[in-house]
Image: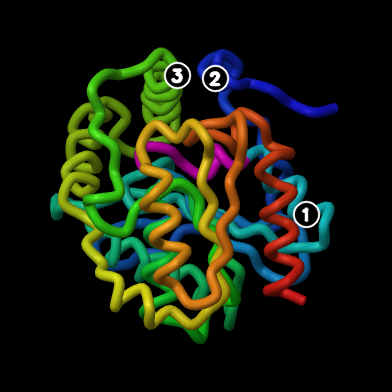
Amino acid sequence: METYDDDLYKFEAEGAAPLPDKMDQGWLERDGARIWYATYGSGPAVILLHGGLGHSGNWGYQVPSLVRSGYRAVLVDSRGHGRSTRDERPFKYERMACDVLAVMDALRLEKAGLVGWSDGAVIAMILAMQAPSRVAGVFYFGCNMDPSGAKEMKEITPILDRCLRRHAKDYAQLSATPDQFEAFSDAVSLMMQTEPNYSASDLARIGVPVAIVHSEHDEFIKREHAEYLARSIPNAEFVNLYGVSHFAPLQRPELFNDPMLAFLRKVLA
């Protein structure tokens, strides 16, 4: 039965669907942080990279779909997010991309498909630029690659407020520093305000398959920027998700999962 949570009332109250029993989980020590990861299922690897302030549990509606489709879903809590720790240095997307490579090495994954949401999409695209031999393709949802792509945020809408409340609850439950959500949020926001800063020539050098996925009502990203990304990256495809916002994987999972699986079938055949 199709799930609808367009206004995120269910997400605020309960979070995403619970993740299935883990096949494997662990932590690795890297560059001042302890990074948590977990895997589910078997088959070609698909790494799911969550958005800023969130954690891997936000993929609760995607992991079962991937496992049923014959993939090994790999989750990584970005440094400072969820169960992963951080040091006092500012957040950097490129540092978090190196964390993902370290997880791939720990799991002996030579190559994987990447599904990135918001900040996770930036991390995935950096990997496509800097470690293309490790990337089968990038399903890039809801993010910008330079400051011009972000909308001006004039107010916190009710949907955003519900999402932030859920993030704060989850942080308190999962983090090694459960009382520091405000400081954590400020540090992530600073990164978002100053990064990423990639040019059209940077994007033009991406050689792996890419799908640029944009939601009709995205609160943060301009449609024209998503279209610019699709034009700038060689052979990238553009996917528009109608009736949803930046939180499509939670609002209408099937609407998100269908194009995700179609893309993965092409790049992990």
**Magenta range:** 52-59
- Would you identify the image quadrant in which residue 269 lies? bottom right
Identify residue type, mark 1: Val
Amino acid type shown at disc 3: Ile
Query: Marks 3 and 2, how far apart in space?
Result: 6 Å
Report crowding for label 1: few under 14, some 14 to 19, many 20 or more residues within 10 A (C-alpha). some
212 over 269 or under it: above or below: above
**In this figure, which residue is indicated by the disc labeled 2?**
8
Q: Are marks 3 and 2 in contact (CB under 8 Å)?
A: yes
> Which secondary structure, mark 2?
loop
Judging by the rendered image, the residue that carries numbered circle 1 is 67
Kind of residue sitting beneath label 2: Leu
Q: Which of these two is toward me, 232 or 186?
A: 232
Give the x, y percent position of residue 61: 68, 38
Q: Quadrant of residue 62?
A: top right
- Front in this rendered view, residue 34 or 76: 76
Q: Circle 3: is it few (<14), some (14-19), or many (20+) Cα within 10 Å? A: some
Which of marks 2 and 1 precedes in the sequence? Answer: 2
Horizontal and vertical percent for residue 185?
25, 34
